[in-house]
Image (cartoon, grey):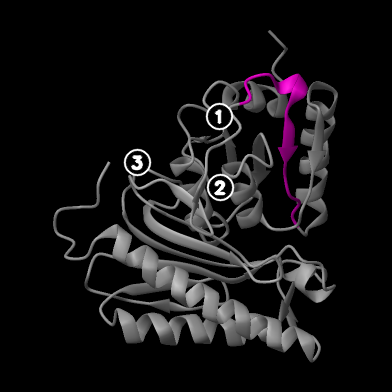
Amino acid sequence: MTAPHSLTVSPEALTTIAADIATRVGARIMELRAVGVDVAASKSSITDVVTAADREAEQLVVAALRAARPDDAILGEEGTGLPGTSGITWVIDPIDGTVNYLYDLPVYAVSIAATVTDPAAMADGRRAIAGAVYAPRLDELFAAFEGGGARLNGRALTVSGKTDLATALVGTGFGYTVERRIEQAAMVSRLLPRARDIRRLGSAAYDLCSLAAGRLDAYFERGLQPWDYAAAALIAREAGATVIGRDDATLPGEPLLFAAAPGLVHELRDAVLGAPAA
C-alpha cells in the first residue's frame, strides 16, 4: 500500500524528518534526566505520571515539525492538537515509558509518526506511512516508511517468524487504573501457561520495535492510545509482523492490539482471550 496520490512528499522523506527530530529530542531528554526529574502531573491515576521533561519534549517536537512541515496537523500525548491542511497528521509521544524515565530505567523512547486518514487501518482511523522511535539511553533508532522495510540504526529488521506459542517470548504492558490492571492480570494468567514467557519492558513503542527486531516473538496490550503505537506498529509491520485487533470485526488499537508473525498472531489472540488450545 502506498501513500495517497494527493500527498506531495514521499514517506521516505517524512521518515528522515521523524528520525532527525526524535534523535535531537532524545538527546535533550537525556540532558534533562541527568539533572533530575520533576513530576508535573498525573493522568489516569496517581501512578500515571507526566514529567516536566514530557512537556518540554513535546514542545520541542511540535516546534521542529512546525518548522519543517508548517501545513501538517499534529496530535501529541501531552495535549497538543493542531490542525493542518496537507492531509498529514503527526502523532507523537515525547517520552514513551515515562515511569522508566522517572526511575532512570533505560527503556524509554521518543516516538514520531506521520499518518494519513484511513478508517480501515487502525482503531483511531489513521494509517502511519512513516515513523521513527528513538531510545536515547540505548542509542537505538528504529525507523520505517510504508513499503520500505524497517531498520535499526540503518540495519534491516525482520521479525523472528516464530509460529509456536509454546516457545514464544511475548511482550505486554499494563495500564494505571485498578480496573484496567484487573483485566490485564486475567489476560496474563490465561497466556502464561501457554507461552515460553512474558516480558513487561515499560514502553509500548519499544515493545513493538523489539518485536520488529526479533527480540520478542509476539506482543499484545489492552488500552493503547494512538501515540503509543503509531510509529512502532508501522515498524513492526514493515519488519514482517501482522497486527490485528480484538476480533476480525475490530481494528487494532483500542481496546486491544496483537502483533506477531502471521503464523502466530491468531494463536496469541486466542490464548489471551481464553479460546481453547487447538
Residue at numbered disc 3: 120
Judged left or right of residue 20, residue 7 is left
Q: Nearer the viewer, residue 97 or 177?
A: 97
Tell me, yes or no, whether the highlighted magenta stretch contains residue 170. Answer: yes
Measure how far apart labels 2 and 3 are at the Cα level.
14 Å
Q: Which mark is residue 261?
A: 1
Q: CA distance from mark 1 to mark 3?
A: 21 Å
Magenta-span inclusion, residue 101: no
Callout 2–callout 1 Cβ contact below 8 Å: no
Q: Quadrant of the C terminus?
A: top right
Label 3 CA crowd tier, 10 Å (few <14, some 14–19, many 20+)? few
Q: Is residue 51 above or below residue 160?
A: below
In the rendered image, the vertical position of residue 219 relative to residue 165, given as above or below: below
Residue type, label 1: Ala
Extreme residue toward the front, this view: 155
Report, in whole angstroms, how far the alpha carbon at label 2 lies from the one at label 1. 20 Å
Residue 162, visible in the rendered structure:
yes
Magenta stretch?
Answer: 162-175
Which label sits on residue 254? 2
**Residue type beneath disc 2:** Glu
Q: Residues within 10 Å of mark 2 (few under 14, many from 20)?
A: some
Residue 48 appearing in the image = no
Across and down, in percent, residue 14 comes to 33, 66
The residue most toward the top is 278
Instruction: Give me the residue at 66% from left, 34% from top.
Output: 217
- Foreground label between 1 and 3: 1
Residue type, mark 3 in image? Ala
For this rendering, which residue is in front, 186 or 244? Answer: 244
Image quarter of residue 84: bottom left
Residue appearing at x 85%, y 31% in the figure: 189
Nearest to the observer: residue 252 or residue 259: 259
- The mark lying in front, picked from 2 and 1, is 1
